C-alpha cells in the first residue's frame, strides 16, 4: 500500500487469521510520510509477519519504490495473493507484476466520486463505475480495462493522462 491507500489495507489486516503469514509493504516518498507501520505490527502481533517500509529517497527503510519490493518479493517467495491500494500507477504496476507471476491480486481503487451511486459517471473507468462495481476489483479484470493506470478523471469529469 502507499499513501492514503494504507487506510483500507489496515482494515483488511483486522480480518487476518492467526495462522496466516502476512507481508505488509508500506511505500512512501520519505520518512515523514510513513504511516501505520506500528499499527500494522500491532494488528499482526499474533501472526508470523513482516512489515517492510520503502521510501523513494531512502530516508527510512529500503530505498526505492514499493513496486520494486513487490517484484523482488513475488519473485523469491510464495504468496497466495496480493492486495494493493494507493496511487493508481503504483497499483497498476503491482497488479501487472503479480498477475505475471500467476498470483491472485485485488486492488482497491480511488476515483473522484460525486454521487456514489453510479448516476453521475465521474468515477467511470472504461465500462466500470468504481462506486458501483468496486471499489475493489480483481487484477485480471483491471488489466482488461484500458483506462486502469493510464488515465484519470479530473473534478470536472474530464479524462486526463497520468
Image (cartoon, rainbow, N blue to C red):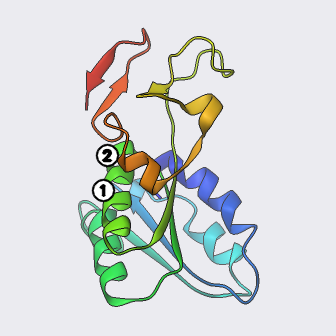
Please name the residue shown 62% across and 70% down the image: 40
**Mark 2 nearby-residue class (10 Å; few <14, some 14–19, many ≥20):** some
Identify residue for label 2.
89
Q: Nearer the viewer, residue 102 or 56?
A: 102
Front residue of this view, candidates 127 and 64: 127
* Viewer-side residue, 125 vs 67: 125
Q: Quadrant of the C terminus?
A: top left
- Could one spot residue 2 in this view of the protein? no
Total marks placed: 2
Percent x, y of residue 88: 38, 43
Q: Is residue 53 left or right of residue 121?
A: left
Q: Quadrant of residue 11?
A: bottom right
Counting from the top left corner in percent of width and height, residue 161 is at 24, 27
**Which residue corresponds to mark 1?**
93
Q: Is residue 153 above or below residue 98?
A: above
Could you tell whether 12 is left or right of 5 in the image?
Answer: right
Taking 97 as reference, is 150 above or below it?
A: above
Residue at 67% from the left image edge and 62% from the top image edge: 12
SS for tag 2? helix
- Contact between marks 1 and 2 (CB within 8 A): the answer is yes
Q: Quadrant of residue 101?
A: bottom left
Q: Give the secondary structure at mark 1.
A: helix
Amino acid at each position: 500500500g502507499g499513501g492514503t491507500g494504507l487506510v483500507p489495507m489496515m482494515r483488511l489486516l483486522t480480518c487476518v487469521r492467526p495462522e496466516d503469514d502476512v507481508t505488509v509493504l508500506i511505500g512512501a516518498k520519505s520518512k515523514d510520510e510513513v504511516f501505520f507501520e506500528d499499527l500494522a505490527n500491532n494488528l499482526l502481533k499474533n501472526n508470523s509477519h513482516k512489515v517492510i517500509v520503502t521510501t523513494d529517497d531512502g530516508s527510512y527503510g529500503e530505498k526505492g519504490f514499493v513496486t520494486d519490493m513487490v517484484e523482488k518479493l513475488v519473485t523469491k517467495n510464495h504468496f497466495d495473493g496480493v492486495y494493493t491500494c494507493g496511487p493508481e500507477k503504483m497499483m497498476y504496476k503491482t497488479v501487472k507484476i503479480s498477475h505475471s507471476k500467476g498470483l491472485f491480486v485485488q486492488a482497491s481503487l480511488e476515483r473522484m466520486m460525486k454521487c456514489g451511486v453510479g448516476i453521475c459517471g465521474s468515477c467511470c473507468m472504461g465500462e466500470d463505475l468504481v462506486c458501483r462495481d468496486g471499489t475493489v476489483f480483481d487484477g485480471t479484470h483491471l488489466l482488461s480495462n484500458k483506462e486502469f493506470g493510464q488515465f484519470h478523471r479530473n473534478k470536472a469529469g474530464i479524462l486526463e493522462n497520468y
